[in-house]
Image (cartoon, rainbow, N blue to C red):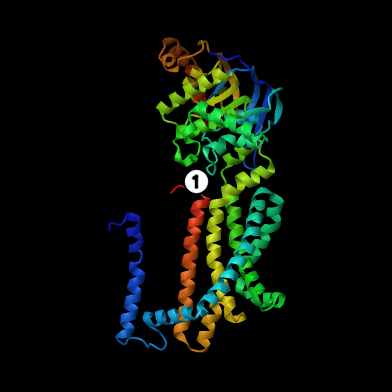
């Protein structure tokens, strides 16, 4: 079978990760490193299969994905709206900008105790944390995208009689959309980062809990299963995201 | 066939435009008196910095003069003016069709009527086959055709054009100039056309306004004597055309030299 250039390139991308796994496996098999602390890829794969077979892994994945998804949507939607308003209306920018400047650099995981106080130990506190962490990169990117729309498009909109509503929904939003998507992609990675960290300390479910709990029980292979799973989830969601982006922004030159 | 001339009329009296920033005070336009009659094709030519684009932006309502009056008599026109910008300004996120429809959508034209008008406008500029394309998929010339369709479809009293073909290669420019004149002759609308090319001004316009720089003033207004309909290629090769071009160049040369001396001095 002859592969197209695109697929050949995709396969070439697998060389370095597979190579790494092979080297890792061989080193442990010849006795370099302690297999109790650093399991071989084959050990991790075996454990992965067992956990998946029992349904335990799927349960944790489902919990983590639900929290990420809910937090992502709750954080991103208002961020886009606020970002666009900041670009369109100067008073909004003057009011909101200092707040963002002050709150953005705070490590969001530092808010977890506060969120536990407010929302309790259930899903709500984790979802709130993801939402807050997602909000900032999205609002900043949205504002930057909207503020950098070329002047000519504002002129065209005004000259052709656009109302504020049309300006908002047909010009500023779409003009900012490539930057909004860049912000959403950063936010997606950030949401996994903060969620797993919060599941370490404040949860009895989710991949973060799985990792932390196996560390406490010194089940190193399960720990690695958790880490690998996060990586796979990140990869899948990121690829899905690219596909969505291609559908939603067809004018972006390829 | 030349349509009956109709369109908005403009009367500008003692118009003045200053730009004041913290560093500089610039007199962009000074003492501008100009009348444009309905259906006239008026070209404005001048060196860069003469304020011709500023004048056009004031006509478009995108800027306000500092002093003086500008009256646009556009009674009976639902849309006073529509502008064609130098770099087309088609929204990259809209298909050609959605771009052309934009000025109808903003004004609440019913969908069925809008579709019919968009179809006609796309046919007029020969973009029917490309209606679902995005601007980045089109050549520069096709994008400018789209921008012209977007302007004409609103049926404005006056078309304002800011060096619309300046970024095109020579062949495409000639083709689009001829198309513009054909469309204008069919519709008979008022056109104010800004260019830095004397040749373009003489080929297209009924009158040519020559402007000077720093400050932008009207130096002279020339009646272009060539009859219509015009064959642009034949006209540009004729001796009368060459003579008039030379005359204007001499007027303008003085100005360009003066401006240059000022910049260097």
Chain letter for the residue marked with disc 1 in the picture: A
Residue A172 horizontal side relative to residue B235, left or right: right
Residue receiving disc 1:
A251
Give the camera-side residue of A249 and B197.
A249
Residue B11 horizontal side relative to residue A184, left or right: right
Question: What is the x, y in percent for residue A212?
Answer: 53, 83
Query: In the figure, B122 relative to B137: above or below?
Result: above
Q: Residue B148, can we see it?
A: no
- Per the image, label 1 sits on a secondary structure element best described as loop
Query: What is the number of callouts on the image?
Result: 1
Question: What is the x, y in percent for residue A91?
Answer: 72, 51
Q: Residue B258, can we see it?
A: yes
Residue drawn at the location 60% of the way across and 17% of the way down = B40
The quadrant holding residue A101 is: bottom right
Residue drawn at the location 28% of the way across and 56% of the way down = A2
Q: Quadrant of the N terminus of chain A?
A: bottom left
Question: What is the x, y in percent for residue B134?
Answer: 49, 41
Question: What is the x, y in percent for residue A234?
Answer: 49, 68
Residue B49 horizontal side relative to residue B8, left or right: left
Give the camera-side residue of A13 and B122.
B122
Query: In the figure, B230 relative to A11: above or below?
Result: above
Query: In the figure, A111 relative to B252: above or below?
Result: below
The quadrant holding residue B39 is: top right
């Amino acid at each position: 079978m002859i592969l197209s250039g695109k697929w050949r390139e995709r396969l070439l991308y697998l060389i370095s990760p597979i190579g790494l796994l092979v080297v890792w496996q061989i080193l442990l098999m010849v006795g370099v490193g302690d297999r109790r602390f650093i399991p071989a890829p084959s050990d991790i794969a075996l454990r992965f299969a067992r956990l998946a077979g029992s349904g335990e892994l799927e349960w944790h994945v489902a919990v983590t994905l639900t929290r990420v998804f809910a937090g992502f949507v709750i954080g991103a939607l208002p961020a886009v709206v606020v970002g666009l308003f900041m670009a369109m209306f100067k008073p909004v920018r003057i009011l909101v900008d200092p707040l963002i400047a002050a709150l953005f650099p705070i490590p969001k995981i530092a808010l977890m105790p506060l969120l536990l106080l407010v929302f309790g130990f259930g899903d709500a506190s984790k979802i709130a944390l993801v939402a807050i962490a997602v909000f900032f990169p999205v609002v900043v990117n949205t504002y930057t995208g909207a503020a950098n729309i070329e002047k000519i498009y504002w002129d065209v909109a005004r000259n052709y009689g656009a109302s504020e509503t049309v300006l908002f929904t047909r010009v500023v939003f779409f003009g900012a959309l490539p930057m909004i998507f860049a912000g959403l992609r950063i936010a997606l990675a950030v949401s996994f980062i903060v969620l797993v960290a919060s599941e370490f300390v404040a949860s009895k479910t989710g991949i973060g809990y799985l990792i932390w709990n196996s560390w406490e029980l010194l089940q190193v292979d399960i720990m690695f299963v958790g880490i690998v799973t996060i990586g796979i989830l990140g990869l899948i969601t990121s690829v899905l995201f690219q596909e969505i982006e291609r559908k939603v922004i067809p004018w972006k030159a390829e | 066939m030349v349509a009956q001339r109709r369109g908005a009329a403009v009367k500008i009296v003692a118009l003045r435009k200053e730009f004041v920033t913290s560093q500089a005070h610039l007199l962009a336009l000074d003492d501008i008196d100009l009348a444009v009659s309905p259906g006239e094709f008026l070209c404005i030519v001048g060196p860069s910095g003469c304020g011709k684009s500023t004048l056009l932006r004031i006509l478009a309502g995108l800027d306000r003069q500092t002093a003086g009056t500008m009256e646009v008599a556009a009674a009976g026109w639902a849309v006073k003016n529509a502008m064609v910008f130098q770099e087309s300004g088609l929204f990259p996120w809209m298909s050609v069709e959605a771009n052309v429809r934009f000025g109808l959508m903003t004004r609440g034209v019913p969908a069925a009527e809008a579709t019919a008008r968009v179809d006609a406008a796309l046919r007029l500029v020969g973009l029917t086959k490309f209606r679902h394309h995005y601007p980045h998929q089109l050549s520069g010339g096709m994008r400018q055709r789209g921008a012209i369709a977007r302007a004409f479809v609103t049926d404005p009293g006056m078309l304002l054009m800011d060096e619309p073909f300046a970024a095109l290669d020579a062949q495409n420019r000639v083709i689009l100039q001829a198309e513009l004149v054909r469309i204008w002759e069919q519709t008979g609308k008022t056109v104010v056309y800004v260019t830095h090319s004397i040749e373009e001004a003489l080929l297209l316009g009924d009158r040519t306004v020559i402007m000077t720089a720093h400050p932008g003033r009207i130096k002279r207004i020339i009646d272009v004597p060539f009859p219509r309909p015009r064959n642009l290629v034949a006209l540009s090769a004729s001796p009368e055309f060459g003579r008039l071009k030379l005359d204007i160049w001499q007027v303008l040369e003085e100005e360009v030299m003066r401006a240059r001396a000022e910049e260097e001095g």
